[in-house]
């Protein structure tokens, strides 16, 4: 199969979908790989490494899309890429279609077969979402701590405090991969951490893991409002696979928060879990709601491409290889978990949550 790896076009998105090691594996399985020139920019690879791994470097994205049967990307196509998609082609990437009607409609029009990383399942987990969830969860505390600084518009707090001075209070909404990674980082920086989730068994696991050093609470609107009134940093880490994120934090709750508090919405690529959230970029990451600072960058791991490219490629490569070896239909027939990643085929939405999100 002819496989294309184009450069990512989202603002400050420096990841590339496949490492030279991944290209080597695909070529060793008798596939042709075409990489857009300088697609690696920011991920610490070189065109020469891709050539050595067996890829052919093409000068433009148009050439890569035109020649390839399978396009492997990191993020969903942006508007300037819509015209490149075509019938008979397979697109394998993060799509988050429930949060983007324009991309959904473009895929319907193009009749491209679209397979979303974030809805592929394995043993009731999301194996292709997990590595970037871990990166984003850890980054949420890093960017949150920076945003709490006075020079960033925050309360002027050091997350972990110092002897004789209380640490910042961190509230994490959701106990999945993002939430657990965020809580781990916050606790490591000696913050006062509380995590909320609906799943009591998950809260028991977290309590055991941290030996009671992180507070756990059963989530409810009442508890969320109470915790936010005392919080310095809030991390939104909720997920409904393939669907829009639930709005857990209302503007009224935020109005009752401390001036200069910070809210990081890691669920923004699925529409966000704060009422006042809107997507931002690494170039302009924050905005103010009432007297609080919102950070809503939709491609957070793009800021650490050296780490996140390798983590993503490690996870996606076995699935990409299966699609290339067997075709998408053969690979989906063999692996029901991969089949759940198929969001559109020949202009038809297959994934139910996307249909519901856009009433299509």
Image (spheres, helix red, strand yellow):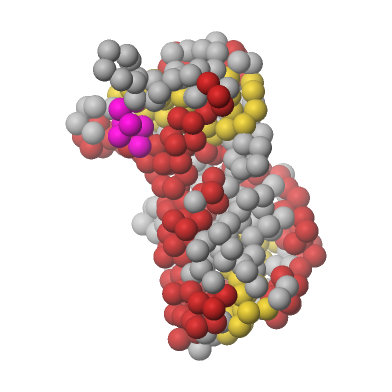
Q: Is residue 77 left or right of residue 333?
A: right
Q: Is residue 45 above or below residue 101?
A: below
Q: Quadrant of the N terminus?
A: bottom right
Residue 337: % across, % down: 45, 62
- On screen, residue 346 versus residue 127, left or right, reads right
Regarding residue 283, the answer to whether it shows in the image is: yes
Residue at the far bottom: name it: 30
293 or 123, nearer to the observer: 293
Q: Is residue 183 above or below residue 41?
A: above
Relative depth, front residue between 286 and 117: 286
Q: Is residue 268 magenta?
A: no
Q: Quadrant of residue 184?
A: top left
As drawn, the residue found furthest toward the front would be: 151
Residue occupying the point 61% across, 83% down: 56
The mark tally for this picture is: 0
**Above/below status of 342 relative to 207:** below
The quarter of the picture where residue 85 lies is: bottom right
Q: Nearer the viewer, residue 270 or 299?
A: 299
Residue 223 location (% of width, % of height): 43, 17
Q: Is residue 187 magenta?
A: yes
Please report the residue visible at 69 percent of the width from the left and 47 percent of the height from the top.
Answer: 100
The quadrant in which residue 127 appears is: bottom left
* Residue at the image point whose x is 37% and y is 41% from the top: 181
Is residue 334 visible to us here? no
Give above or below for 145 relative to 289.
below
- Residue 301 appears left or right of 214: right
Segment colored magenta: 185-191
Residue 136 screen position, x and y as percent: 47, 44
The residue sitting at 49% across, 31% down in the picture is 146
């Amino acid at each position: 199969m002819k496989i294309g790896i184009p450069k990512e076009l989202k603002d400050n998105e420096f990841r590339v979908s496949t490492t030279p090691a991944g290209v080597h594996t695909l070529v060793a399985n008798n596939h042709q790989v075409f990489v857009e020139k300088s697609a690696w920019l920011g991920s610490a690879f070189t065109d020469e490494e891709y050539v050595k791994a067996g890829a052919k470097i093409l000068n433009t994205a148009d050439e890569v899309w035109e020649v390839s049967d399978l396009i492997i990307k990191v993020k969903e196509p942006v508007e300037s890429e819509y015209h490149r998609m075509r019938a008979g082609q397979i697109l394998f990437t993060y799509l988050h279609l429930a949060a983007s009607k324009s991309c959904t409609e473009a895929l319907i029009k193009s009749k491209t077969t679209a397979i979303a990383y974030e809805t592929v399942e394995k043993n009731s987990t999301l194996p292709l979402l997990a590595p970037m969830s871990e990166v984003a969860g850890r980054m949420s505390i890093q960017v949150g701590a920076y945003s709490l600084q006075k020079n960033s518009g925050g309360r002027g707090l050091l997350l972990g405090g110092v002897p004789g001075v209380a640490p910042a209070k961190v509230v994490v909404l959701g106990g999945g991969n993002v939430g657990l990674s965020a809580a781990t980082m916050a606790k490591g920086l000696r913050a006062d951490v509380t995590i909320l989730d609906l799943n009591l068994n998950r809260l028991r696991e977290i309590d055991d893991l941290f030996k009671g050093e992180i507070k756990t609470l059963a989530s409810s609107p009442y508890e969320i409002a109470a915790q936010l009134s005392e919080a310095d940093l809030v991390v939104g880490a909720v997920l409904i696979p393939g669907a829009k994120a639930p709005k857990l934090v209302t503007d009224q709750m935020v109005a009752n928060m401390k001036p200069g508090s910070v809210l990081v919405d890691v669920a923004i690529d699925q529409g966000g879990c704060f009422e006042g959230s809107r997507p931002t970029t690494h170039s302009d990451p924050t905005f103010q709601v009432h007297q609080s600072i919102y950070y809503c960058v939709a491609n957070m791991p793009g800021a650490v491409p050296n780490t996140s490219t390798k983590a993503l490629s490690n996870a996606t490569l076995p699935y990409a290889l299966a699609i290339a070896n067997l075709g998408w239909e053969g690979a989906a027939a063999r692996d029901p978990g991969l089949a759940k990643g198929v969001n559109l085929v020949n202009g038809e939405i297959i994934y139910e949550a996307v249909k519901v999100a856009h009433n299509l």
